[in-house]
Image (spheres, grey):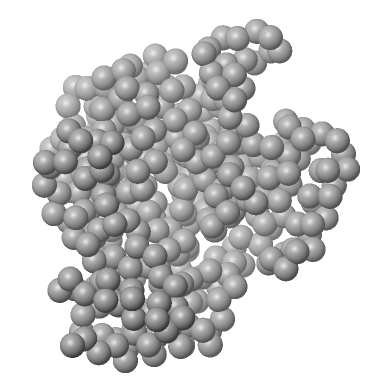
Amino acid sequence: MTALHGAEINEAVNRVVNSGWYLQGEENKRFEEDYATFIGTKHCIGCANGLDALIWIFRAYIELGVMQPGDEVIVPANTFIATILAITENNLKPVLVEPKFNTLEINDELIEAVITSKTKAICIVHLYGRNAYTERIGALCKKYNLKLIEDNAQAHGCRHTDGRVTGSIGDAAGHSFYPGKNLGALGDGGAVTTNDERLAATIRTLANYGSSRKYVFEYTGRNSRLDEVQAAVLDVKLKYLLEDNGHRQDVAKYYYEHIVHPLITLPDYLPHKQNVYHIFPIFVANGKRDMLHDYLEQNGVGTVIHYPIPPHKQECYKTWNGLSLPITEKIANEELSLPIGPSITMEQVDAIIKLINDWSVK
């Protein structure tokens, strides 16, 4: 294996294969304990993927009587669709709130106006690896007795200004370990972190067919478990996460300092630790985003659009298609993600910056 930390990952995989124990064993226990310690919570529950992690949080709150179908969850309009799917999967109602264009995260100044008697939670998304939590959001949760749920799928190791790690700030958080994430497995994987013991026990039961004892089923659950191979791999990679994030942060700082083009803007710069740069987004004005994408592709630089169609314009949510959410739509129309990651070299970054700065729009 030539991947980063490949020798240790190979050793971990072989250890699991040779053990003959592939589900709910010592590797899961070790990773859950280590990840909970890293995040700063009492509990970590491994599950099949990041979407399931969010689904189980809402489902567990329903089973515990904290929420019921039809209740409202405030959520950013600018997010990957999984955040929204987890809410509607539980027959809860998403209330979409616009982001700020300069931060890309939910606009906390717009939240209070949409809180109703049916509102039970605010779900923040640490999108692109940026900390989305604000003191205003915390105060609103306290004032209106709302649960604060974090979608931490893209922000492993990110911190708030007070030092808390994202995933430990709210009442519960969903994490994704999709291979491309800052902390990625060799396949799908996810986890929930929380300090709430009842919530943790309910989620663990729901994700194990609804069973906490063999052949005894308390809930109509599903099979959503993190397997031993993925847990072992994640535990190896967790040791290097801060180091790998540090490289992403160095690359991002260099991008900020050297990208200079009249059509390109960057979101507000956040000090180190408040952004772990899962994605490095830039914004291209005047409808020229696709031109820059094609130009970079032609010069050997791969870029991605996150995300070209916002949730409210997707066919699966047809009843929202008529909504006007101009900031979210502007982000979708102008965003382009540049290469970033623990393996990219500064020489490669220099070459990308030169291509961007030399880009001539005719």
Residue 335 horizontal side relative to residue 150, left or right:
left
Can residue 119 be seen here? The reply is yes
Horizontal relation, residue 181 to residue 13: left or right: left
Question: Which image quarter holds the C terminus?
Answer: bottom left
In this rendering, the answer to whether 142 lies above or below 246 is above
Left of 330 or right of it: where is 76?
right
Q: Residue at x 12, y 42 (%)?
A: 323
Pinpoint residue 184: horizontal percent, then vertical percent: 59, 53
Q: Which quadrant of the figure has residue 209? A: top right
User: Which residue appears at 26% of the width and 43% of the height?
Assistant: 314
Viewer-proximal residue, 343 or 286?
A: 286
Identify the residue shown where x is 28% and y is 36%: 316
Instruction: Give residue 321's quadrant in the image.
Output: top left
Residue located at (59% from left, 63% from top): 242
Left or right of 346, for residue 5: right
Q: Is residue 80 above or below residue 95?
A: below
Report x, y in % for residue 2.
72, 68
Of residues 155 and 284, the one nearer the viewer is 284
Residue nearest the viewer, comparing 360 with 189: 360
Tell me residue 288's x, y (percent).
Answer: 21, 74
**Residue 112 in view, yes or no:** no
Q: Is residue 249 above or below residue 172?
A: below
The N terminus: image quadrant: bottom right
Q: Position of residue 155 (x, y in %)?
A: 47, 54
- Front residue of 55 and 122: 55
| Residue most extreme to the front | 298
